[in-house]
Amino acid sequence: MVKLATPEQAQTKKATRAAFGVTLAELADAGVPVVAVDADLSGSTTTKKLADAGHADRLFNCGIAEQNMIDVAAGLSLTGNIAFTGSFAVFGTGRAYDQIRNTVCYSNLNVKIAPTHAGISVGPDGGSHQMLEDVSLMRGLPGMRVLVPADYAAARAALKLAAATPGPVYVRMGRASVPCVYDDDVELELGRAYVLREGADVTIVACGVEIREALAAAEALAAEGVSAEVIDAFSVKPLDEGTILASVAKTRRVVVAEEHSVIGGLGSAVAELLARKHPAPCEFVGVRDRFGKSGEFEELLAYFELDAAAIVEAVKTVRAR
Amino acid sequence: MDSRSLESQARGIRIDIVSMIAEAGSGHPGGSLSCADILTALYFGGVMEHDPADPQMAGRDWFFLAKGHAAPALYATLAHAGYFPTDELATLRKLGTRLQGHPDSSMVPGVEVSTGSLGQGLSIAAGTAAGLALDGEAGCVFALLGDGECEEGQVWEAAMFAAHRKLGNLVAIVDNNGLQIDGKITDVCSPEDLGAKFAAFGWEVTHVDGHDLEALVEVFGAAKAAGGDVPHAVIAHTVKGKGVSFMENQAGWHGKAPNAEQLQTALADLQAARA
């Protein structure tokens, strides 16, 4: 079991994106041949921190040209570098999907697609910038691994894991500051899910910022006498089938929560698994086939019914089935 | 290799191009024939440092076929150079082959990266050139683009990046045959003066007859030797379908295989060129 944040650590709020540049700098300091390729957002994604740490030659700013960004990273990987791309998730995946598909994945290159500002975390910028289909897009690509870290410490661990994993990896990071879930030194393994809270009545599988909502929901449910198991499936692909199936065998009821469309993301991955291996009633907390809206992140969590209250409702619905 | 041997080599590559596409029953002869001399100059004219026995050789020069649909030309070139047996060319596009319709780097020795989706090759080449520069490594990076391909906006993103990063170890070659699937590039959606465009982005530009093997060897060699802090563009003026009378300058032969009778005519044309 992974170590969770202490109550003091849990008071700290940090954005997952803040882990990006400093982790790359840490890896570069240690002699790992990482490079960052960004598209005029190096301050926002924090890849600039790599340059600030004395590795200016390892940051390649392509200007506002995301397609070129992905393929420049592809070229840098061919000469032995571990290439991380930046930009916002909406541009860093959608604008450059063909480059990710036909060059990075089809050639199985050592490129890490690691955009920030995913989902509704970009808040007031509105629907044009709130990427809610990126996990779906990336999960469908042969050879691509998909990681959705819950907090700053998990993002650091996911970035290090991506660097240590040969081939294409997607790391999804957000803009908003979110409470710490994990201990600062947490380490994550590819293809593993982590049971963060044990329970008997329902399994809540979540990833990203929905982890803290799931933990809050489990706390609220406990007060009502419902025992919820909470699993962090940060490795959306490959998915830890064993941990999820073992939990569902016990609880027989599942709620999946993600800050992403209900189409094609973690919910779909879990549903595909359960349909094959252990059919069980399942409810999905996510954005329901619609675009985002301007608003503050916390407001939007409630507006799009992604908050702990929505998870509690979904648990009640699935238990009534 | 002297110019007569280079011509013979190019003819052999063209014969294999039309033969393998006829055998496959599909493929892209026009743009493969137009770039056969360019590939011959690079691989057999002493321009590129490469080793068929060690495709990943440190310090090698790199080649990217941005116009991936000219795969038959690349496959024939690599086979003649010794990267894999020429017998295998007859398996083009068939189930189980390494020689996919567009080049797959996971299968074919000598193919640095998979291509086929147009507009990406120059960016990949620029990233590779930047990677070599970062590590202070030798090696010149060549990318072969189609002129129709230059309608893709990403080509100009790459042109901007390469000049900005001062990638003097990068050479973009444009196979300027003037035709694309739907017709003349000037009719479909003209990119206008490609040389002027590269020059406007800060590239050094050279124009060359894309079927003059001696001139190609000289221009490519000079661009590689020049290095410096400016990327090099070579606009190679070519004829689509070059060497096969009924295919020359015909957009209809962009992506169509010759039938048995047409193949015989094509081979006769190419053999006659020997005289």
Image (cartoon, coloured by chain):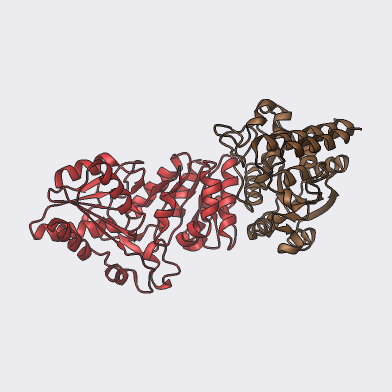
Chain colours: A red, B brown
Q: Position of residue A9 (x, y in %)?
A: 26, 56
Figure check: A126 above or below B207: below
x, y percentage for residue A257? Answer: 27, 57
Q: Quadrant of the N terminus of chain B?
A: top right
Closer to the camera in the image, B273 or A202:
B273
Q: Is residue B178 above or below residue B2?
A: below
Q: Is residue A61 left or right of residue A24?
A: right
Asked where in the image residue A107 lies, by quadrant, the reply is top right
Relative depth, front residue between A59 and A87: A87
As drawn, the residue found furthest toward the left would be: A225
* Coordinates of residue A171 in the picture (x, y in percent): 42, 51
Residue B46 seen in render: no
Query: What is the residue that sits farthest to the right in this orientation?
Result: B275
Which of A128 and A44 lies nearest the eye of the viewer? A128
The C terminus of chain B, quarter of image: top right
Please state if A132 lies on the left or on the right of A244 as rendered. right
The answer to whether residue A318 is seen in the rendering is yes
Residue at image position (41%, 72%) is A126
Q: How many marks?
A: 0
Where does residue A295 sit, x and y in percent of width and height?
36, 74
**Residue A165 appears left or right of A305:** right
Q: Nearer the viewer, residue A214 or A1?
A: A214
Please give the name of the residue rendered at 28% of the width and 51% of the height, measured from the top-left corner: A182
**Image quarter of residue B186:** bottom right
